[in-house]
């Protein structure tokens, strides 16, 4: 099985679990008052489905074609159409995608990025290396944890997109620790860099499927447990 399809299948298992546990419903509750959502990294569509159920229209973007196809099927199987969601295949970190100005064609009230992730191999690391260096990471940081480096890059790009559009941003991250205003230098730095005026935190204790779903790593070590305790961190910047 190729890595792109494998990632889609693993993430689908984890995302379906999140959906059934109503974790996505908790995330959607943070978006009250925002009608149209631009979702960066829709995965296989369970988060998108939760957004539609909550009354949002969605512009859903993912670079993984296998994920896009699965998401389209899931949404169609639940009776929704293009009136509810527009799917776009594209990588927000890729210069060509940015230069095409694709995103400028679609209006939204908020940009979201929930639990960013991707598959990894040597070619992927090489392709993202220039973007990670441009963002400000160094070679040692990237080698030590390419997944974390990728997440930082994408979150930075999503902040840039929301800044250009002049709309708020909502980020969901997975962590082992609660984050709030007193313990978070990272998102505060993004708030200042992109001139957001306000940041709102929330945390939700949850579980995630590791073995059997999308495998989780902690400090570079793969977690082989079936269910892992995590904390979903909600960061809303306006």
Image (cartoon, rainbow, N blue to C red):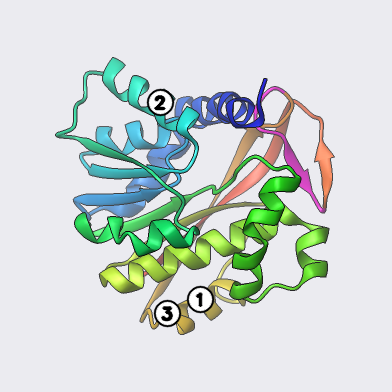
Q: Is label 3 or label 2 in front? A: 2
Q: Which residue is drawn at 38% across and 79% down?
A: 196
Callout 2: SS: helix
Circle 3 SS class: loop
Q: Which of 170 and 131 is in front in this view?
A: 131
Per the model, the C-alpha gap separating discs 1 and 3 is: 6 Å
Q: How far apart are marks 2 and 1 (CA)?
A: 32 Å
Residue located 63% across and 58% down the image: 128
Provide the residue span drawn in magenta.
212-219
Task: Give the crowd class for mark 3: few <14, some 14-19, many >=20 residues within 10 Å.
Answer: some
Labelled pair 2, 1 in contact (Cβ < 8 Å): no
- Mark 2 or mark 3, which is nearer the start of the sequence? 2
Contact? badges 3 and 2 (CB < 8 Å): no
When the figure is inspected, residue 40 is found, relative to residue 198, above or below; the finding is above
Cα–Cα span, label 3 and label 2: 33 Å
The percent position of residue 54, horizontal first and vertical second, equals 26, 38
Q: Residue furthest toward the left?
A: 83
Of 132 and 77, the residue lying toward us? 132
Q: Are marks 1 and 3 in contact (CB under 8 Å)?
A: yes
Q: Residues within 10 Å of mark 2 (few under 14, many from 20)?
A: some
Assess disc 1: are there few (<14), some (14-19) or many (≥20) residues with their C-alpha within 10 Å of its C-alpha.
some
Residue at 67% in and 20% down? 1
Residue picked out by circle 2: 69
Task: Kindly report which numbered mark, 2 or 1, lies closer to the viewer in this rendering.
Answer: 2
**Which of the 4 quarters of the picture holds residue 195?**
bottom left
Q: Which of 58 and 183 is in front in this view?
A: 58
Residue 193 is situated, as x and y percent measured from the top left of the image, at 47, 83
Residue 39, percent across and down?
36, 48
Dominant SS in magenta: loop
Secondary structure under tag 1 reads helix
- Residue on which the image places disc 1: 190
Q: State the mark number for residue 194.
A: 3
């Amino acid at each position: 099985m190729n890595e792109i399809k494998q990632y889609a299948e693993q993430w689908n298992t984890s995302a379906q679990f999140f959906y059934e546990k109503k974790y996505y419903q908790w995330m959607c509750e943070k978006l009250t008052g925002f009608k149209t959502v631009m979702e960066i990294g829709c995965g296989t569509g369970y988060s998108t489905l939760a957004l539609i159920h909550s009354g949002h229209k969605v512009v859903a973007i993912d670079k993984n074609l296998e994920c896009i196809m699965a998401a389209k099927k899931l949404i169609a199987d639940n009776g929704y159409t293009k009136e509810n969601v527009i799917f776009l295949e594209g990588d927000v970190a890729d210069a060509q995608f940015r230069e095409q100005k694709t995103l400028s064609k679609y209006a939204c009230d908020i940009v979201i990025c929930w639990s960013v992730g991707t598959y990894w191999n040597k070619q992927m690391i090489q392709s993202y290396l220039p973007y990670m260096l441009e963002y400000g990471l160094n070679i040692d940081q990237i080698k030590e944890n390419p997944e974390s480096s990728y997440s930082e890059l994408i979150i930075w790009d999503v902040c840039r997109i929301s800044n250009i559009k002049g709309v708020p941003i909502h980020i969901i991250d997975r962590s082992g620790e609660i984050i709030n205003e007193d313990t978070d230098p990272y998102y505060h730095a993004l708030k200042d860099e992109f001139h957001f005026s306000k940041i709102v935190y929330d945390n939700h204790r949850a579980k995630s499927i590791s073995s059997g779903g999308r495998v989780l790593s902690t400090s570079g070590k793969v977690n082989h447990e079936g269910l892992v305790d995590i904390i979903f961190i909600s960061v809303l910047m306006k």
